[in-house]
Amino acid sequence: MKATIDTLISATADVDLQKIAEKVKHNERITDAEGITLFEKGSLPFVGALANFIRERLHGNTTYFNRNFHIEPTNVCVFSCKFCSYSRLYANKEEGWELSIDQMLDIVKSYDNKPITEVHIVGGVHPKMNMEYFIELMQKIKAHRPNLHVKAFTAVELDYMFRKAKLTTEEGMKQLHAAGLDSLPGGGAEIFAPEIREQIAADKVNADGWLRIHEVAHELGMHSNATMLYGHIEKYEHRIDHMRRLRELQDKTKGFNTFIPLKFRNHDNEMSYVPESTITEDMRLYAISRIYLDNFPHLKAYWPMLGRDNAQLSLSFGVNDIDGTIDDSTKIYSMAGSEEQNPAMSTEELVTLIKQVKRTPVERDTLYNIVKDYSNVNFDNASFEVSNN
Ligand code: V47
Ligand code: SF4
């Protein structure tokens, strides 16, 4: 591997890029200015080679996936993010849905006897779904299936819930954790820089609030993920600013598991006039985030948003996790124009997808404990083609 990076350094004429490659070789942190330099000057093969070097130093060929399912309690939302194709105002209830606790419990029960390790629960911010409602939901899920890991609620949902209940972040988080909340997903982060956030997500929790909620979760021993919505009106400096805030919090708490870049999709929302980023720019973003976020153990490509082919491609650009079976009718991405309308992949499909690009498929749980190594498992009937359809 070192030979590859030495070749890259000697083939690079630009001294700034050479210096960055030397840092990567010696496992040193790059600065914010160097992050910007990578966005401005780093070609796809250059950043890809560096990111792959880091990915293989951390994880070899191991590529993680998990077996999970999603529940979206509601698409009714009090907020009005301009990029959102999914939320409906409370006044437009006929276009919205809201699931009762029993309906959500029925979804959980439909996975009885299936080897699922995680339920992911994220939705709109409904004015009537409050702390009591979600505490009851957590308790009932855990009473039914104690070992199911509950990863639920973005910091946006939590901020609203806690404020409405007049609880401090610490008190609110403790109550939900005691009821069964195990970890937090990474949504709601969007772009932290106020000059962009105010244009695309003006009325929900700001950067400091989002980061504080994750910090409190980490202090209680919970883990969480972090996302970044990219490829809209933000500039390179805003991407680096976003990642710098995450890197600083991670230095302090070490509570983040995974960074998940989310590509802005422009179907049927108030930002449909903004063109979507190209696949080249997507791969460069993955690679640069792998290089910049040196203290994040994992980088995830969320395959329903990116599509299967591109998720495969991302495994050469720093990504070491492609999320899970998902197995649901999740709408937040399909309504925004994502590749997958009803995302679900069987374990066989995920394993085959990873093996096709010569990586090693390993099933993990939410906290990256290994559930099963599939390198020597062959599926007789896995003869399908991986495609975006
Ligand atoms: O915060 C909404 C994004 C996020 C669009 O932690 C859009 O494992 C693109 O929390 N184009 C919520 N993205 C999703 C989320 C998540 C997803 C996958 C894995 C994990 C995890 C967490 O969905 C929102 C927002 O950034 N989103 N609309 C859109 N038009
Ligand atoms: Fe509501 Fe989330 Fe959509 Fe924003 S992105 S409007 S918070 S559902």
Image (cartoon, grey):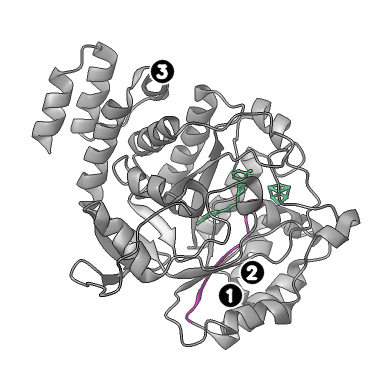
Evaluate if marks 2 and 1 touch, with contact meaning CB atoms under 8 Å apart: yes
Disc 2 secondary structure class: helix
Q: Position of residue 91 (x, y in %)?
A: 91, 55
Disc 3 secondary structure class: helix
User: Number of callouts in the render?
Assistant: 3
Q: Which residue: 23% across, 54% down?
A: 359
Q: Which residue: 73% across, 38% down?
A: 82
Q: Which residues are magenta?
A: 147-155
Nearer the N terminus, badge 3 or badge 1? 3
**In the picture shown, does residue 71 fall above or below 335?**
below
Which residue is denoted by mark 1 in the rendering? 180
Binning the other alpha carbons within 10 Å of mark 3 as few (below 14), some (14 to 19) or many (20 upward) gives few
Disc 1 secondary structure class: loop
Q: Which residue: 20% across, 45% down?
A: 57
Amino acid under disc 1: Gly
Judge by depth and name the residue closer to the eye, 42 or 156. Answer: 42
Q: Position of residue 259 (x, y in %)?
A: 44, 47
Q: Position of residue 145 (x, y in %)?
A: 53, 84
Binning the other alpha carbons within 10 Å of mark 1 as few (below 14), some (14 to 19) or many (20 upward) gives many
Q: Is residue 32 left or right of residue 106?
A: left
Q: What's the mark number on residue 176?
A: 2
Q: Is residue 343 visible?
A: yes
Judge by depth and name the residue closer to the eye, 275 or 124. Answer: 275
User: Is residue 154 inside the magenta stretch?
Assistant: yes
Q: What's the mark number on residue 40?
A: 3
Residue at the far right: name it: 91
